[in-house]
Amino acid sequence: MLVKTPNGAQDIRAIWMENGVVKAINQRALPHRFEIVEIDNSEALAEAISDMTIRGAPSIGAAAAYGMALAAIRGEDMEDAADRMRSTRPTAHDLFYAVNLMLSERERLPGAADEYSDSIVARCKSIGEHGLDLIRDGSKILTHCNAGALATIDFGTALAPMRLARRAGKEFFVYVDETRPRLQGAKLTAWELLNEGIDHAIISDNASGHYIRADVDVVIVGADRIAGNGDFANKIGTYEKAVLARENGVPFYVAAPISTFDSSLLSGDEIVIEQRSPDEVLILDGVRVAPEGSDALNPAFDMTPSRYVSGFITEVGLLKPDELSKLLDTQ
Ligand code: MRU
């Protein structure tokens, strides 16, 4: 991923391992500070996933793989380490996929964790290539949350086609939902698009209907878990964008690698939705915005039925919801 820091442009991954230490971009500090955190034990790694220092489904998966690598290096009980990783965030399937894979490859850790991360990067690049034709010169795109390189180690899922389209010289415009309550759109997606020189504007979440009705050509989002029938969970607010897109005849695409697909679930109703602290809604950047005494509800994700999905942009191609078995056959 291209990162512009006060020291100049760097090509950097969101998470990697160096000499037995995990290094990751601190996603809680952006866009104000560009910081790399260093983590040398699986407990701290699990905490970094829970507190969203590292976030976004494929990055969470890579982080969990590295958490297993740290546990292996320290000779910990690997089943305990797996449970520690699994208890961090319940919705992103990548986390569970990566932990199970690392358990089966425990003899090859930490190398297996590096291989897993490399494979995610390669898959995201393929997602970008398969989604490239959805973006034309002059396209107006809407995206929700951050499904970029920060969320996937490099390239992104929803942002991968945009990244590759821009690098191929295409000019287009992105509406970036701010994504309350944690503002991943305003803080992280905007930062990534700025680094890539992609024209964009942040909109408040409740402005998206206004623009989808009048101006948006295509909506592209990521996913945290996709059930066997194509229903999927993604950042809270995704469902209403999908319904608005359908109402206005705007195509709605979901970009995700195979690690996000959970064929064990028959439908999205079975997806566990993470509930996070009410404080994330009540307190904005350290300042309480609601009256003392008011409570808040804070589901981190919602579920969108597959009937709203025009297609899934995956590493094996652009698939309609009824073609998902082609992808699941390769799992
Ligand atoms: O709670 P977050 O920030 O981890 O949620 C992230 C999202 O919902 C992303 O859209 C999703 O993980 C896809 S990332 C490629």
Image: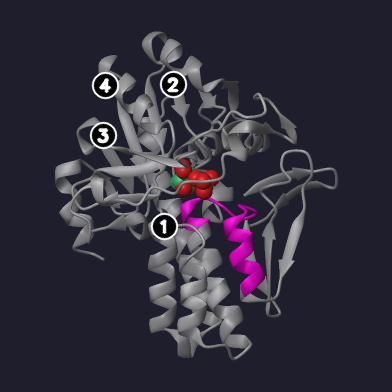
Q: Give the residue type that dot 4 points to.
A: Arg
Q: Which residue is mark 4?
A: 246
Please tell me which residue is depicted at 68% across the width and 25% down the height of the picture: 289
Q: Earlier in the sequence, mark 2 or mark 4?
A: 2
- Horizontal side, residue 168 vs residue 271: left or right: right
Please tell me which residue is depicted at 59% across the width and 28% down the height of the picture: 294
Please tell me which residue is depicted at 39% across the width and 28% down the height of the picture: 219
Magenta residue check for 55 = yes
SS state under label 4: helix
Q: Earlier in the sequence, mark 2 or mark 3?
A: 2
Rendering coords of residue 249 (x, y %): 26, 17
Q: Is residue 66 visible?
A: yes
Quarter of image, res 15: bottom right
Rendering coords of residue 117 (x, y %): 51, 66
Picture layout, residue 124 above or below residue 144: below
Picture layout, residue 128 above or below residue 107: above
Q: Earlier in the sequence, mark 3 or mark 4?
A: 4
The residue segment tinted magenta is 43-59
Circle 2 or circle 4, nearest the eye: 4
Q: Earlier in the sequence, mark 4 or mark 1?
A: 1
Which of 51 and 170 lies nearest the eye of the viewer?
Answer: 51
Mark 1–mark 2 Cα distance, whole angstroms, equals 24 Å
